Amino acid sequence: MLKSKKMLMTLCLMLVASSLAACGGNNNGNNAGNSSAPASSEAAAPSESASASAPASETSTEPPKPAELTIWPDTSEDKLAVIEAAAKKYTEQTGIAINIKPVAMNDQPDVLALDGPAGKGPDLFYQPGIGSLVVKGLVQEVKTTDAIKDTYTPEALAALSQAGVLYGLPLVTETYALFYNKKIVPQAPTTMAELETIMKEKTDAKKQEYGFLFEAANFYYAWAFMGGNGGYIFKDNSGIYDINDIGLNKEGAVKGANLIQSWFTNGYLPKGVNGDVVGGLFTQGKVGAVINGPWAITDYKKALGDDLAVVPIPTLDGGAHPTSFIGVKGWMLSKFSKSPEWATDFAAFLTNEENALEYFKQTGEVPPVKNVLSNPILAEDPLVSGFSGQIQYGIPFPTVPELDHVWDPMANALKFITEGKDAQASLDDAVQLVSDKMKMAGAK
């Protein structure tokens, strides 16, 4: 759980940045330091005041410069354009060519496991957290200066670390909240009872009109209602997770699952609802409210204009808040990189103030870079309050590899639950499958 006010305020600023990113942003800050000498070498590190566009001179202590570095970004076209632009600048400054090979983010670990040992893998690849990358031997420690580390929020660095060892540099942080269309929902719901009233009054399935939609069978989103009701994935003891204590079929999680099921039983949500349905109907003006993240602002704003608003997810019975996931995506240093110092330097360059700012201006995704988050213009965006409010109740993903074994069983369980099958039995089956998968993978 998020325990300190300092952490909460930092994460609130992240989502403040997000909504402005979608509307264009403005770079009025100083460019943070990076240089042509690898940031991972203390002797070769740039000064803290060095400009990202003005590399420091090379020194005799820097490691041999490779002719080329290879990176695997995700395949999203809007993200590729800004990465390509940054790579071009880096090549101009260092003379190192950047080979950009897009690989779907979810496929990267499996592909790297084959290509890495064969010498065909990347120096850097892009992942949503550390997961099982350490256990699988796919990453190596990122060794960089304290000055570079201090440019990021500590929570973001922690999300890409395991047992105190850093394996990547963060580019994006994210959570989700409640978007609503003011034409359909003039006043934002603050409680689940109010949201359910909107569902009842605004739903006409025959016309494909709904008061509220979300991806109910997607554990990423469904977790908010399960965790908010007291459920847990692995028991969290001050950041130490007990993988033998799984809470996904305990009382709180079951209560959340039953709540979701009731929306299908009452006809408020259509069976098989997915992201395309949610986004498509919302942008067509047929849905009052949806749950999504700041990455959706650009499309939603384009479709709804000033009728778009964002608020925290309404409170549950008893006043508890739904607990949205907080995730961090970053550039991971491949175990198979032959130039880890320069790969680290390029990762630091991709995520420095100048390039991070440009990244969220182009993509709407939030970089956890302190100087970007402190931009005063960000707080003026009218969409920001919803995300900054929701982040207070979010929780980070458990930083244990066993989390990988949770997603598929929970997706299946939620599918069954949305189809009317008993929630307790479905979750019992899911937890048993998670336990079996962990044991097969060697967990103790």
Image: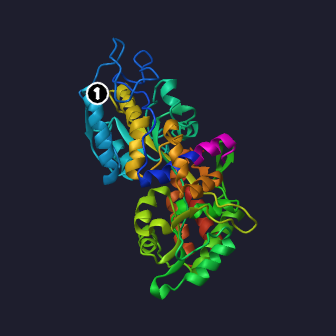
Of 346 and 257, which appears nearest the observer?
346
Circle 1 sits in a helix, a strand or a loop, which is it?
Answer: helix
Whether residue 119 is visible:
no
In the picture of the structure, the residue carrying the numbered disc 1 is: 93
Membership of 4 in magenta stretch: yes
Of 400 and 40, which appears nearest the observer?
40
Residue at point 61% right, 63% down? 313
Quarter holding the C terminus is top right
What main secondary structure does the magenta stretch of the protein show? helix
Looking at the picture, does residue 372 appear above or below residue 183?
A: above
Q: Position of residue 345 (x, y in %)?
A: 38, 28
Looking at the picture, does residue 147 appear above or below residue 309?
A: above
Q: Is residue 75 left or right of residue 405?
A: left
Quarter-of-image position of residue 304: bottom left
Q: Position of residue 107 (x, y in %)?
A: 36, 51
Q: Is residue 65 left or right of residue 380?
A: left
Membership of 429 in magenta stretch: no
Q: Position of residue 411 (x, y in %)?
A: 51, 64
Amino acid carrying label 1: it is Gln
Span highlighted in magenta in the image: 1-12
Quarter-of-image position of residue 357: top left
Residue at point 29% right, 41% down? 85
> According to the image, what is the colour scheme of the structure?
rainbow
Q: Is residue 223 left or right of residue 274?
A: right
Looking at the picture, does residue 201 appear above or below residue 62?
A: below
Looking at the picture, does residue 227 appear above or below residue 163?
A: below
Of all residues, the one furthest to the top in this rendering is 60
Residue at point 49% right, 54% down? 19
Residue at point 30% right, 47% down? 81
Of 176 and 375, which appears nearest the observer?
375
Of all residues, the one furthest to the right in this rendering is 318
Quarter-of-image position of residue 122: top left
